Amino acid sequence: MDPATPRTAYLDATAGIAGDMLLAALVDAGADLAGVQRVLDALVPDSVRFVRSDVDRGGQRAVKVDVEVLVDDPPHRTWASIRELLERSRGNVDVPERTVDLALAVFGRLAEAEGATHGVPADEVHFHEVGALDSLADVIGACEAWRQLGITEGTASVIAVGSGRIRAAHGDIPVPVPAVARLAIGWPTVAGEILPGRGHHHAHDHDHDHDHDHHHSHDEHLPAHAQGGPHAHGSRKVPPGVAPGIGELATPTGVALVRGLATTAGPQPAMTVLALGIGAGTKDTPGRPNVVRVLIGEPVGHPTGSPLHDVHDTPTSAVQIEANVDDLDPRLWPGVVDALLDHGALDAWLTPIVMKHGRPAVTVHALARHDAADELADLLMRSTGTLGVRMHAVERRIRTRSFEHVEVRGQRIAVKVARDDDGTVVRREPEFRDVAAAARVAGLTEREMLHLARTAAEG
Ligand SMILES: O=C([S-])c1cc(C(=O)S)c[n+]([C@@H]2O[C@H](COP(=O)(O)O)[C@@H](O)[C@H]2O)c1
Ligand code: NI
């Protein structure tokens, strides 16, 4: 996405991370879970249900998102088949292109890491039965929530991966589990033991991994200490030569999401924080809130975007609605275009055409956000009387835009500032509607006012 206002997200994975935790944090920060559900329903109908709840994790309020798998015997999926499912959805108005792009990047990493771990080509990696739906829900859900929030760049902290050993489908394996160890290459990680020297809390005396325990292909992934394993409580046995550990804090899906969504590892970048989300893991460990935090804000140094040009208003993926009309009273056309714009069209315009039998006519076009397309199609049909419309998904390349203001002869005029990808200003253009209004008040021609406004904007 290349929205009007850049949005930075900072992911705090210092307590660990799993796919459902990140999705929950993004929902807490403002993403619409019903919208996320719609995307999953479009891709895998009647298969998963997201359930949101508010929970307490170590004394902190957090949002928990549970993924309920609704089918008893879901199909076996390889990475190749998941990729095909996602690719096939392009053009489906209910599945935003950006969500597909992000999910492909995340799943691709997950499949590469799993494939390399087991020595099989990534395409052949199996996401087993229920686990496939669970992974789809976590990955696509988090990517859709990320898209909804208009996040343009992501930074993430060091990832606490955990330590010790766990019992997974692949047997008794070390933490970080093999797939996480691979996914983490090139990213700072730490075991994430409890900080020492705080009264009764001690590195080995609690149950704290989030044990992302929805029904999973890699079932039996109980932390070793929960099974009397190496880093067990007091009397539990620790095999000789094996350091006790804290358990699994980061899952493969969680780390693949960090790697696919965040481009920078490090501390929180300078930003004006606009939203905060806290996402809960399954385990509730006293003294160690088992949460992922997400901070979303406006990078410092970028001017504030006008609230009228919210990031959600300029998606790169949209729906173009069109109809050829040869029988509308021509005096009604300006009102049709205005009504489409008033009802949220990103743009609306008319093209003169010549239809069959040499009939002069008009094509009316409207560009709509995916979630507004049906409503705008209805409006277009009602206001023109046409019996049908064409709708197709389109991709746009949009410069990052924000607004500044100049004052000319005491009149305030908005100036649209367009930037290229590295933030360099490529154009400053006064809004013509403001120019025309200011010209009327100041008693100048529109041409004179436009010249003054452009000069002020450049200055
Ligand atoms: O790729 C997956 S799903 C996976 C790989 C491995 C390997 O290390 S190989 C282990 N697991 C275990 O399954 C659960 C859930 O993980 P999700 O990433 O699917 O949420 C977890 O305990 C992993 O260690 C999964
Ligand atoms: Ni595996």
Image: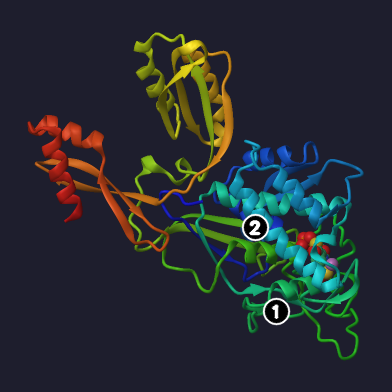
Q: Is 452 placed left or right of 48 in the picture?
A: left
Q: Tag 2: residue type?
A: Leu
Q: Is 252 placed left or right of 330 in the picture?
A: right
- 269 or 53: nearer the eye? 269
Q: Residue furthest front?
A: 358
Q: Residues within 10 Å of mark 1 (few under 14, many from 20)?
A: many
Secondary structure found at label 2: helix
State the CA–CA distance, disc 1 to disc 2. 19 Å
Rendered residue at 8%/33% (across/down): 444
Which of pointers 1 and 2 lies earlier in the amino acid sequence?
2
Secondary structure found at label 1: loop
Q: Is 191 placed left or right of 237 in the picture?
A: left
Question: On the rendering, which quadrant does ligand 2 occupy?
Answer: bottom right
Q: Residues within 10 Å of mark 2 (few under 14, many from 20)?
A: many
Give residue 126's position: percent from left, percent from top: 86, 59
Quarter residue 343 falls in? top left
Give residue 179's position: percent from left, percent from top: 78, 71
**403 up-or-down from 269: above or below:** above
Quarter residue 157 falls in? bottom right
Residue where numbered disc 1 is placed: 191
Give residue 320's position: percent from left, percent from top: 52, 32
Quadrant location of the C terminus in the rendered image: bottom left
Rendered residue at 76%/67% (across/down): 112
- Which disc, if any, is residue 22? 2
Q: Is residue 62 visible?
A: no
**430 up-or-down from 392: above or below:** below
Q: Tag 1: residue type?
A: Ala
- Which disc, if any, is residue 368? none
Rendered residue at 71%/48% (across/down): 86
